[in-house]
Image (cartoon, rainbow, N blue to C red):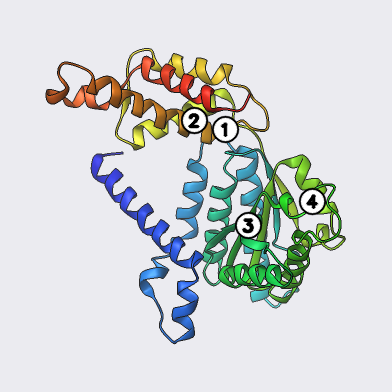
């Protein structure tokens, strides 16, 4: 990817982030309520093929990609059956994403929403991401209001609830308002079944407990998609992409250094997968900045020095990350 292409991509993503922030704040709905259509917020929708192309470009996640393709193909055929006057097979579009942090769940949810929009199943196909704090209130009557507002923002798109299991914490019975959020959500999923897709996500073990916490939950979700942890090679590839996209390059031996760092990282539920790779990269460019600023030629650094990350930058980055992790 050339510098110009990277700049265009960065501008495009910044625009998407700004539009998503506006949607999360409900600005598009407020403008619509007073009869103003905001083309600035809507953006130019991508074609289904463009969205599929981004999905295919993601590192790893082959089983996830296959399940998403199957889901989209099924919906395409069902739509064509309706066009020919054939009966539609009733099925829920709500999904459960099972996986550890940093395994691509939010990214895939965003792409899936876009695909639904491109297919005409959702009017917008935007993503509204919330967690327990975005749904649960502090006092009686507050939770239903917060949950309803989140659903309203997500109408004609996808409501993505990360760490959904936090709505039904184990061992808490009685006045926990998370249960009220679940009951409100179930009702709204039924009320707006043609305008809303809900995706709940989190650790596999805790999500199974969550789905058992309310008799009406399990039946509302069509399928579960499991997001596996990235392999060492996949994390190296993700780090390479982060380096390239930020206009850096790796010095001699850095590839082996990164592989060694990722190979010795502790792989438990707290391991961040792609988030760890991103944190490692961000710390490495910080260490590079410190290293270069302390050199005698700090005022006359050439392009190669400014763009090259060395093994020492990643080793120091890994040490700093290890020091911040809980023991």
Is 77 left or right of 19, judged from the image as shown?
A: right
Q: Which residue is mark 4?
A: 210
> Mark 3 Cα within 10 Å, few/some/many (few <14, many 20+)?
few
> Mark 4 Cα within 10 Å, few/some/many (few <14, many 20+)?
many
Q: Secondary structure at mark 2?
A: helix
Earlier in the chain: of badge 3 and badge 4, it is 3
Query: Residue 261 appears at what percent x and percent y?
Result: 51, 18
Q: Which residue is mark 2?
A: 277
Residue at 46% in and 74% down: 28
Mark sitting on residue 133: 3
What is the CA distance from the residue labelled 2 to the residue labelled 3?
27 Å
Q: Secondary structure at mark 1?
A: loop
Residue depth check, mark 2 versus mark 3: number of the one nearer the observer: 3
User: Observer-nearest residue: 319 or 201?
Assistant: 319
Residue depth check, mark 1 versus mark 4: number of the one nearer the observer: 4
Residue depth check, mark 1 versus mark 3: number of the one nearer the observer: 3
Is mark 3 in CB contact (under 8 Å) with mark 4?
no
Mark sitting on residue 61: none
Q: Secondary structure at mark 3?
A: helix
């Amino acid at each position: 990817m050339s510098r110009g292409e990277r700049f265009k991509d960065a501008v495009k993503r910044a625009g998407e982030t700004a539009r998503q922030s506006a949607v999360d704040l409900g600005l598009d709905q407020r403008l619509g309520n007073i009869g103003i259509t905001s083309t600035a917020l809507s953006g130019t929708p991508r074609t289904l093929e463009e969205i599929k192309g981004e999905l295919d470009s993601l590192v790893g996640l082959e089983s996830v990609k296959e399940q998403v393709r199957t889901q989209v193909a099924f919906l395409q055929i069902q739509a064509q059956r309706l066009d020919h006057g054939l009966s539609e097979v009733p099925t829920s579009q709500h999904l459960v994403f099972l996986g550890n942090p940093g395994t691509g769940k939010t990214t895939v949810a965003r792409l899936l929403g876009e695909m639904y929009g491109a297919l005409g199943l959702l009017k917008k196909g935007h993503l509204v991401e919330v967690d327990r704090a975005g749904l649960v209130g502090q006092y009686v009557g507050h939770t239903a209001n917060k949950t309803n507002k989140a659903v309203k923002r997500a109408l004609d798109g996808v409501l993505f609830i990360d760490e959904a299991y936090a709505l039904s914490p184990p061992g808490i019975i009685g006045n926990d308002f998370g249960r009220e959020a679940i009951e409100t959500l179930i009702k709204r999923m039924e009320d707006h079944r043609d305008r809303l897709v809900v995706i709940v996500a989190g650790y596999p073990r805790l999500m199974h407990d969550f789905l058992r916490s309310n008799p009406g939950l399990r039946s509302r979700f069509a399928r579960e998609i499991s997001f596996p942890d990235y392999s060492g090679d996949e994390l190296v590839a993700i780090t390479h992409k982060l380096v390239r996209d930020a206009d850096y390059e790796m010095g001699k031996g850095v590839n082996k250094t990164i592989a060694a760092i990722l190979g010795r990282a502790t792989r438990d539920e707290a391991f961040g997968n792609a988030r760890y790779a991103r944190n490692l990269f961000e710390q490495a460019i910080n260490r590079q900045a410190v290293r270069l600023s302390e050199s005698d030629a700090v005022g006359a650094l050439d392009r190669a020095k400014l763009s090259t990350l060395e093994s020492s930058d990643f080793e120091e980055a890994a040490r700093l990350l290890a020091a911040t992790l809980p023991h």
